[in-house]
Amino acid sequence: MEVLYGAVAASLLLGFLGFCYVLASSKKEAKGKVEGNARSAAVIDGSVDGRPRSEDDGATDVIVVGAGVAGAAIAYVLGKDGHRVHVIERDLSEPDRIVGELLQPGGYLKLIELGLQDCVEEIDAQRVLGYALFKDGRNTKVSYPLEEFSSDVSGRSFHNGRFIQRMREKAASLPNVQLEQGTVTSLLEENGTVKGVVYKVKGGVESKACAPLTIVCDGCFSNLRKSLCHPNVDVPSYFVGLVLKNCELPYPNHGHVILANPSPILFYPISSTEVRCLVDVPGPKVPSITNGEMTNYLKTVVAPQVPPQLYDAFISAIDSGSIRTMPNKSMPASPYPTPGALLMGDAFNMRHPLTGGGMTVALSDIVVLRNLLKPLHDLNDSSSLCKYLESFYTLRKPVASTINTLAGAYTRFSVHHLMKLEMRCGMPVLITSALEGCSQMVQWLCCQDSIPAH
């Protein structure tokens, strides 16, 4: 039984494991730094082979569909490497989401690698140093193993929209990156190769954009996904989101996971005065907000399981009426290799967001793609480009598969099922023992050079 609770703890504390893999791979990458620098010496901040790009050199090199976390980051990175990038985003105003707010330390390390770490500055982002786990009145915490890193390395939590706007601004600051508001309706294909996109701008005017490479990262509701992968989307549960104001978490600068019945509750800071609460509601639908079912569910089922320090703020958040819901989608990465196109971010691969690994996977994928494309100065070389893109799906697996597998553990071992098992077996579960096992796993992974991909 303790093993099963350890599995749940491990899945909920996924950030530790993703972070540890990135830690190990970062150490490995450092050994090859000289080689990497030599390989990329010909590509320098907006120039190719030492000469600035000119508008007369040709049309756009890369079209990016979507300017969320993945889209804005890839636009900046490829723009810095000298490519001319055209980003088409449905809505360039600040997003207002209830997920994509917790970046694990492994994801922050990738931000540093991509030159985007300043995007968590000036948005009232909060440092996250680990997790606290609560069950049946007992609680404990586990901190990230950050001893070997500089003092600024930690997780970060923030308003998703503020973070995305900072990345969009940084991408748009490059002269060879263009951000345009428009809705992409379809891909332009010729003899099985994607040549660009068809999109509509304000007023419904239809336009076309062409480039040798189109990167689709238009999020979990992507309308282009079905053209580029097997869209096997599962919705195991929903998140109900609230914002608690002017309250203090039991463990400052930590994410808080309550192993509640029937499923977990998550708390983490998103600013110096606000705490995000996400209630996981299993099943294909949630109680209705409009007829009061949701308020009743939150007050009668969820509130009694909330830590006493947060109870009053939780009730106040419910009474404010600002209750949000969203489906928790899960989708394996099953692409159709398509010349001229690539899927990234949530359009490509999703896992249950309770574990907070999505942005780490996306940023890791961008590092892989950036490194793949650096030697390829001419993206119009379609055969070479196709070979490089095929390699992407293999090279992303060590990080992505590790995080996806552990996130999947949550859907296989729900807390509700484990509670029933515990009652049937009559075995008390020691939460501290489960966490000690999880912590040992973290320390073990930190010592490894690699985690095999499956």
Image (cartoon, helix red, strand yellow):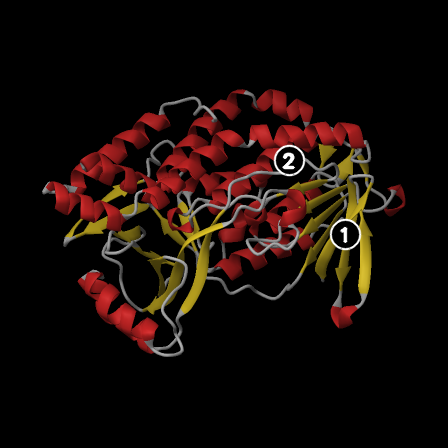
Picture coordinates of residue 144 (x, y %)?
Answer: 33, 39
Picture coordinates of residue 229 (x, y %)?
Answer: 62, 42
Q: Quadrant of the N terminus?
A: top left
Q: Which mark is residue 111?
A: none
Relative to 210, 7 lies left or right: left
Picture coordinates of residue 256 (x, y %)?
Answer: 29, 53
Q: Considering the numbered disc 2 on the image, is that residue within a helix, a strand or a loop?
A: helix
Relative to 26, 33 lies left or right: right
Picture coordinates of residue 324 (x, y %)?
Answer: 42, 68
Above or below, 326 against 356 in this view is below
Query: Is residue 422 or residue 76 the one in the foreground?
Result: 422
Q: Which mark is nearer the camera, 1 or 2?
A: 1
Residue matched to label 1: 197
Above or below, 27 against 431 in this view is above
Residue in the image at 30% along x and 43% along y: 413
Residue in the image at 51% along x and 65% along y: 96
Above or below, 362 against 283 in this view is above
Q: Amino acid at mark 1?
A: Val
Residue in the image at 64% along x and 26% along y: 37
Q: Amino acid at mark 2?
A: Arg
Residue matched to label 2: 370
